[in-house]
Image: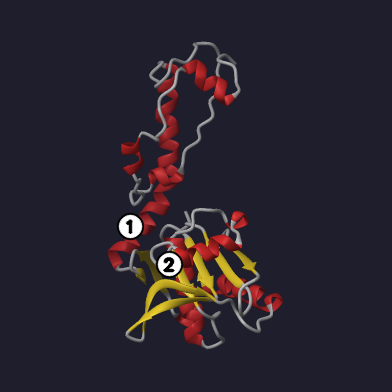
């Protein structure tokens, strides 16, 4: 998987997918060529994009060849060849227009970037964020299907998954309001992990939306290495934040 933001990616990060034999999965998919003009190509492209947005987000990488086993693609990156004879000034707007007109509701935050310097031409990477307006439906020419992703790649959402996706999207604002409503009385009552002075306060809530998503899974393996975050005193916490203990 790719953990960097697309602005921070470098050519070496693309090459590392080859040397580390990174396989396709929930957050990454390889394509040797850009989608063509046929309806089937457009629907496949839109399904890929929507599946990332409806799941955990991820990257579509164009110009990558997969290792083949018994004449079938294995999903493992084998070579970063790049895209030959393409006009980026035409292709990037074409991809963006397909996403804008072929998926509802609109997916916000899709980014496209080219990486030159490969044997046959540039690599194109699409970064699709996890969407909190999900589920998104592919609507091109009446296709009208929902897609998501797991470790095996994309697949259509079934009825139960569609219902759960809509329920999560609709309940998020209320969950955030409920968190704030519950938290304020706890702060006033002094029921906080660290003591808070009784003087007047300005309270800023920073709540990761992913924390409210039941599908979120955290990797607890680093806890066994001793490299995890450790509790600190109130004084050291405020010192690190660069703020006073009283407002």
Q: Where is residue 15 in the image (x, y as percent from the top left)?
A: 53, 65
Quadrant occupied by the C terminus: top right
Q: Which residue is drawn at 39% across and 73% down?
A: 75
- Residue that label 1 marks: 164
Q: Which colour scheme is used?
A: secondary structure
Q: Which residue is drawn at 47% across and 15% down?
A: 196
Q: Position of residue 53 (x, y in %)?
A: 47, 62
Q: In this view, does 129 lie to the left or right of 147?
A: right
Query: Would you identify the image quadrant in which residue 73 lies?
Result: bottom left
- Residue that label 2 marks: 51
Q: Do the residues labelled 2 and 1 touch (CB within 8 Å)?
A: no
Tell me the tag on residue 65. Answer: none
Q: Earlier in the sequence, mark 2 or mark 1?
A: 2
Q: How crowded is mark 2: few (under 14 residues within 10 Å), some or many (20 or more)?
A: many
Q: Using the image, determine if residue 43 lies above or below residue 170.
A: below
Q: What residue occupies the far top of the structure in this picture?
A: 198
Q: Using the image, determine if residue 38 lies above or below residue 176.
A: below
Q: What element carries label 2?
A: helix
Which one is nearer the viewer's eye here, 16 or 144?
A: 16
> What distance separates the C-alpha of mark 2 from that of mark 1?
15 Å
Q: Is mark 1 on a helix, strand or loop?
A: helix
């Amino acid at each position: 998987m790719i953990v960097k933001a697309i602005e921070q990616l470098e050519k070496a990060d693309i090459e590392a997918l080859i040397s580390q034999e990174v396989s396709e999965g929930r957050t990454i998919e390889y394509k040797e060529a850009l989608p063509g003009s046929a309806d089937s190509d457009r629907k496949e492209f839109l399904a890929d994009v929507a599946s990332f947005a409806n799941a955990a987000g991820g990257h579509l990488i164009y110009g990558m060849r997969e290792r083949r086993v018994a004449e079938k693609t294995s999903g493992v990156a084998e070579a970063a060849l790049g895209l030959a004879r393409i006009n980026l000034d035409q292709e990037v707007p074409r991809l963006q227009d397909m996403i804008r007109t072929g998926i509802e509701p609109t997916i916000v935050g899709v980014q496209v970037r080219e990486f030159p310097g490969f044997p046959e031409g540039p690599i194109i990477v699409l970064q699709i964020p996890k969407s909190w307006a999900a589920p998104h439906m592919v609507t091109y020419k009446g296709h009208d299907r929902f897609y998501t992703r797991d470790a095996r790649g994309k697949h259509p959402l079934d009825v139960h998954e569609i219902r759960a996706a809509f329920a999560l999207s609709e309940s998020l604002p209320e969950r955030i309001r409920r968190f704030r409503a519950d938290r304020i009385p706890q702060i006033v009552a002094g029921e906080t992990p660290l003591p808070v002075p009784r003087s007047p306060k300005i309270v800023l809530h920073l709540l990761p939306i992913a924390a409210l998503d039941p599908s979120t899974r955290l990797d607890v393996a680093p806890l066994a290495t001793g490299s995890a975050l450790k509790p600190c005193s109130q004084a050291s916490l405020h010192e690190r934040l660069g703020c006073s203990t009283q407002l």
